[in-house]
Amino acid sequence: MLSVFALGGVFEVGKNMYVVQYGDDIIVIDCGSKFPDETLFGIDLIIPDITYLQENADRIRALIITHGHEDHIGAIPYVLKQLPMPVYGTPLTLGLIRGKLKEHGINHSNDLHLIEPDTEVQLGKLKLSFFRTNHSIPDCVGLAIHTPEGTVVHTGDFKFDLSPVNRQFPDIHKMARIGEEGVLLLLSESTNAERPGFTPSERLVGERIEEAFQRAKNKIFLTTFASNVNRLQQVVEAAALTNRKLVLLGRSMVNVVKVAKELGYLDLPEGMLIEPKEAANLPRERVAVLCTGSQGEPMAALSRLATSTHPLLAVEPGDTVIFASSPIPGNEKNVSNTLNHLYLLGANVIHGGSSATGMHVSGHGSQEELKLMLTLMKPKFFVPIHGEYRMLHQHRFLAESVGVERENIYILRNGDVLDIQNGQASRSRQVTAGNTLVDGFGIGDVGNIVLRDRKHLSEDGILIVVVTLSSQDNELLSDPDVITRGFVYVRESEGLLGEVGRLVTVTVEELQEAGNEWTWSMLKTKIRDSIGSFLYSKTKRRPMILPIIIEV
Amino acid sequence: MLSVFALGGVFEVGKNMYVVQYGDDIIVIDCGSKFPDETLFGIDLIIPDITYLQENADRIRALIITHGHEDHIGAIPYVLKQLPMPVYGTPLTLGLIRGKLKEHGINHSNDLHLIEPDTEVQLGKLKLSFFRTNHSIPDCVGLAIHTPEGTVVHTGDFKFDLSPVNRQFPDIHKMARIGEEGVLLLLSESTNAERPGFTPSERLVGERIEEAFQRAKNKIFLTTFASNVNRLQQVVEAAALTNRKLVLLGRSMVNVVKVAKELGYLDLPEGMLIEPKEAANLPRERVAVLCTGSQGEPMAALSRLATSTHPLLAVEPGDTVIFASSPIPGNEKNVSNTLNHLYLLGANVIHGGSSATGMHVSGHGSQEELKLMLTLMKPKFFVPIHGEYRMLHQHRFLAESVGVERENIYILRNGDVLDIQNGQASRSRQVTAGNTLVDGFGIGDVGNIVLRDRKHLSEDGILIVVVTLSSQDNELLSDPDVITRGFVYVRESEGLLGEVGRLVTVTVEELQEAGNEWTWSMLKTKIRDSIGSFLYSKTKRRPMILPIIIEV
């Protein structure tokens, strides 16, 4: 029996991880992370729950990585620490993974396997082949898994850039061949399923960048995602054409340029790169700066330039700042903040994403490209992947429009298993799937109670009451101590906190006078209730109330 | 001398409050609030710092409210509690203010003054007149303040809707007359200063709504801002045309419809409004629902409908849901979440704002309208207001393009005073201005220290260590108590917390053995340092560490 499911990546954007299992052979595809939203206080990263893989570790033949973006490689260090697997990827993808493993002090170099365009791998009963696609990072692949039940195709992220900057053309002929030989099941990405038309070629961005470089009179600052190596290449070419030296700012920009250059993905003329401090000795019109911060991230290079807190360089009046990017939903405010500061510095700012400036194009195929992929593969069964429900839902309509039977389209949630046997598909089983939260060194050790406490603490702070009782007769040995953090200013609230202390004393005495047996837990509850309603009536706030009883 | 400044509303969006002062006469314009961003943990609302007004209370002649949106009226209850002032507004504006004051238990009805189109008010040496404008709420005005130094015009929010739904035409002739008589200083709003062209008329939205109502086969749910009474009117008309009854869901929708109907701003056919429970007895094609939740607010009616948790009504397959709105930056994720749920319920969803669907138009004038206002008023001095710097900055260029002298344009920060005397302007003074934070009943009692603590608590929680010392010899009377909240799961971290306890004991003993004089504050610092670095090395987290020393 063939079984296919997602451990991450459907009903969400990010955290991609898919599993194809035939009998005793498991292929895992991608191992991504995603960023927590603002309700997950203090959490650094979200990765897939890999319980199923841990329980079936002996069956896992390979982890295939389709490309080097964080939503496809970000969980690798955390997962490999718990569950070593052979990892397969193209040269740039493996280059980025190596850097990540090194940072985490993981030695896995013996089990990293290179995928070349014509690579074929036999793993147990499964044979894997790959096809090149285009995306906003070079060296992307989709894969075909040939199983005795039929062929499963996973596209990875893709667009059809028919005039790619690096001349890594999409391997349409191979896709057509795979389709012609017969595809049982297609898993295809849905990011832009709501966007009509055909995503423009990355080359358009290059033309706009060149024009802007030719018009700019002083320094140029350009920000984009560091991993968009083809865009970096076009910046290099515009800089060369306009006789500018190039400065790199931001850790990920420096890293990616280093890896991409070493592996031959970025062609940098001799002597073009200079150190930030050398820029000071050049005329302003000879300098271009490639920097991080396209999403307004507060600690990134461009944000520090915008607030004049970058130690090495400054944006001056008349400089040009180019956002070769669109704000990702959720980042609009940070980007806007950066823009305000740049205008205050007197910069000419070019921003606004694709429609306004042509300085950005998506890395994902729009509706016509998704239909082209479906047409090339002409699958019997179809599962839209990578996206929230609204995107998967639209992708279903696209699949129907090119002739996939409606009843053969399955929208799966993470953990929903699609079983296929003798050409019949069924969805009735689930495996464990979910979010594993990373906080510092802790993987999965922060859950709902800790998060609920953090939320509570963030809203109204904490009030701690220490009650010291005599072990002989349970009498109060001193006035209760009242300590707060994040609730009110102590200096201005001495009266209020004094009243809290007296109320605690009264509560303890009442309990003692009632004469009945009482427990510490009863006392704590009584303190929480009386202080809680007192404080709410006075402040309309509900701090966490933590009674501590010390018996001496 | 004439002095003009903002106490809120520039270098930000929201919290509008402007002051015009001539000698001993002060006019305050608007009294708005804004919502806190996610860095202001637990804060309910931000209002202007009114220190200046409190210090000059005897000079204040009036608070003029230009219209009834929260960024213009939201701070009124908080400000009036501290500083009673005569309040002037148009009928709908006063209607909304009355509701707000009632909620806060404030009786101010003797000092609410009606503005009619031809109202003129003499206040000290100042004469005020008003002109009607259009916006996304009815009954908006701009005002002209005639001072011995010259006339100051404040536009309020405006667009030029030349075919307004309610036939409240913009009073262009009066604006022209004011301009012709001479305007010394114009304060004009900048919200859409970055948007080229002319904002479409609200009527266009009505046409789209009518089409959608005619096409819809089952129930219709339409969400928009409740205060957009003209849009509500168009929904009423579409419902009447397609023979549907109307259900209102959401507190602000019910409130605004009530006030607008009573005051004659909303024309509702007899018997059109029905209760939610009556809808169950009607065929689905006879029902339209007007509901809150256009920004995906988790507790709003549409969000509860989307998650099938609304107690009264349900979205069923084939129902139509219309977002007559655009997501405000920052709300994209919440809106997207609502969309996912609505699609899962099988609804036909119409969303995407103005460009995609025509279901929304802005309430603010675009560049050509801002230029039209500048042209009508032809001011000597110009101060762009309402907006972040990027918008004020663009508005400056627009003013220059219609002939305002560059050196006569002032971009002010909140508190920057523009003084004008004998036709000469200067900017050299500041008055107190800033954010006053509202948290529960507290106005301005939460500041940086409390917020910093809330942020710290939200990230890694708190660890409390109680050390009980003998008052005789400072010996430890028992093992330290270690309590955490929001840091780690206690049950899974017993080992870790045990080590913390032992480390505290060691720290106390070391201090005692050193033999020198020591203070509690030294002990606390030592505990914080040793536990802090221990926990970071083990968990890479930095909880707040709170040592409590009890002497018995």
Image (tube, coloured by chain):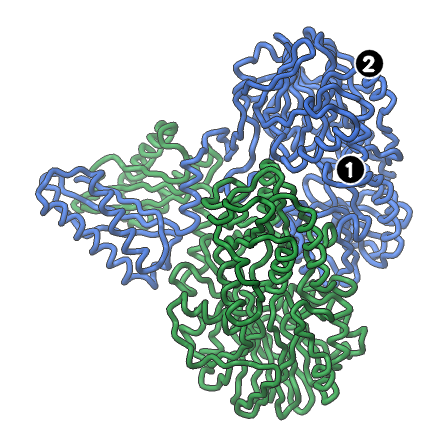
Chain colours: A blue, B green
Q: Mark 1, residues whose alpha carbon is within 10 Å: few (<14), some, or many (≥20)?
A: many
Q: Position of residue A59 (x, y in %)?
A: 60, 10
The kind of residue tagged 1 is: Ser
Of B507 and A398, the residue lying toward us: A398
- The outermost residue toward the right is A241
- Helix or strand or loop: what does disc 2 sit on? helix
The chain to which mark 1 is attached is A
Query: Distance of mark 2 from mark 1, alpha carbons?
Result: 26 Å
Write the residue at 56% across / 79% down.
Answer: B19
- Helix or strand or loop: what does disc 1 sit on? loop
**Does the image show residue A264?**
yes
Marks 2 and 1, the one that precedes in the sequence:
2
Q: Is residue B10 left or right of residue A346?
A: left
Residue B6 badge: none
Where's the N terminus of chain A, which quadrant?
top right
Write the residue at 53% across / 51% down.
Answer: B38
Q: Is residue A123 above or below residue A337?
A: above
Q: Is residue B254 above or below residue B52?
A: above
Query: Which residue lies under the disc numbered 2?
Result: A181
Q: Mark 2, residues whose alpha carbon is within 10 Å: few (<14), some, or many (≥20)?
A: few
Where's the C terminus of chain A, which quadrant?
top left
Q: Position of residue B288 (x, y in %)?
A: 58, 51
Q: Position of residue B263 (x, y in %)?
A: 53, 72
The kind of residue tagged 2 is: Glu
Residue A366 badge: 1
The chain to which mark 2 is attached is A
Q: Is residue B379 left or right of residue A333?
A: right
Indicate the quadrant where residue B235 lies. Answer: bottom right
Indicate the quadrant where residue B190 lies. Answer: bottom right
